[in-house]
Amino acid sequence: MFLSIPLFTLWFCTSSSSVKDKEPVSKKEVKTFNAGNKNVAVLELFTSQGCSSCPPADRLLGTYTSKENVIVLSFHVDYWNRLGWKDPFSSKAFTERQYNYASAMNAGVYTPQLVINGQSEMVGSDANKISATIKKVFAQEPEAELSIKAVTPQNGKVNISFLTSGNTTNTVLNIAVVEKKTTTEIKAGENGGATLTNYNVVRNFNTISQVNKGEGTLAIDVPNNGDTKNMSVVLFLQEKGTNKILAAAQAGF
């Protein structure tokens, strides 16, 4: 079932902290984009384990996790929690991010809702529209580059060093800690009795409100109950005002 709710506008951001000790990540663990003059597609799925229409979209999102120049993020919203099942990955902040997108695009708020590169929204299970939109993104010239140079888990945080170039004016840097694959037995609600698998589930999300060209460092908390072997970090540059995503990178711990 789709659930629609009224719109309002919400903005949020946080500041970063610096990294002192860095260890290189092996190249095979780092997923860097905008290389070879090809644009990046960042797929943000707003979903819930309490929504019976969401599992097909969750499965479709999973098929994109290994696609070249595509990064997927699963944001679990909290407005389904009142209907019998509290999604353990849900967050009010993720609901606010969805509202912000919907307001900017004059769109409704529903699940499963997919936003591609901050510019286009669609039903998260609409395979044809998703594929066509990604092709349009790939046809565009990349405006910036972003690469992750080092990732170091330490004392409940993950320290990240990165490099940006190109158009970083008027952008923010988003940082997500994601759990690459999760399986949950649903005890109640619309999906009660089902076992659901979710991909690249966002467990922590922060935004740095100002980005400079060149090298940078930051740190973000790692969930206490998360398996670091099943986690990665995603960074992506997003233009203020337009919400357009300009570059992205992903790396394992």
Image: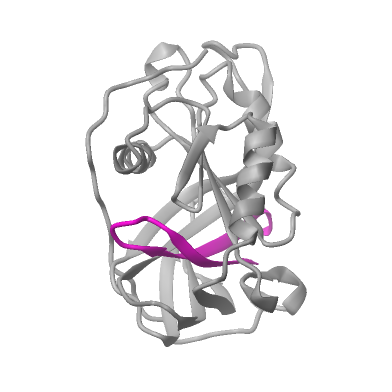
Q: How is the image coloured?
A: one colour
| Magenta-drawn stretch, dominant element (helix, strand or loop) | strand
Provide residue 219's location: percent of width, then percent of height. 42, 71
Please tell me whether residue 220 is drawn above or below residue 197 in the rendered image. Answer: below
Provide residue 57's location: percent of width, then percent of height. 63, 30
Which of these two is toward me, 226 or 94?
94
Q: Across the whole image, how many numbered discs are drawn on residues? A: 0
The structure residue drawn at horizontal position 77% and vertical position 73%, both measured from the top left corner, is 28
- Magenta span contains residue 235: yes
Residue 116 visible in this rendered orientation of the protein: yes
Residue 212 occupies which quadrant of the picture? bottom left
Which of these two is toward me, 94 or 146?
146
Residue 103 occupies which quadrant of the picture? top left
The structure residue drawn at horizontal position 50% and vertical position 80%, both measured from the top left corner, is 161
Please tell me whether residue 243 is drawn above or below residue 48 in the rendered image. Answer: below
Provide residue 93's location: percent of width, then percent of height. 33, 42
Quadrant where the C terminus lies? bottom right
- Magenta span contains residue 76: no
The structure residue drawn at horizontal position 52% and vertical position 34%, both measured from the top left corner, is 122
The structure residue drawn at horizontal position 57% and vertical position 50%, both measured from the top left corner, is 226
Q: Which residues are magenta?
A: 229-253
Q: Is residue 180 left or right of residue 236?
A: right
Residue 183 visible in this rendered orientation of the protein: no
Provide residue 55's location: percent of width, then percent of height. 64, 25
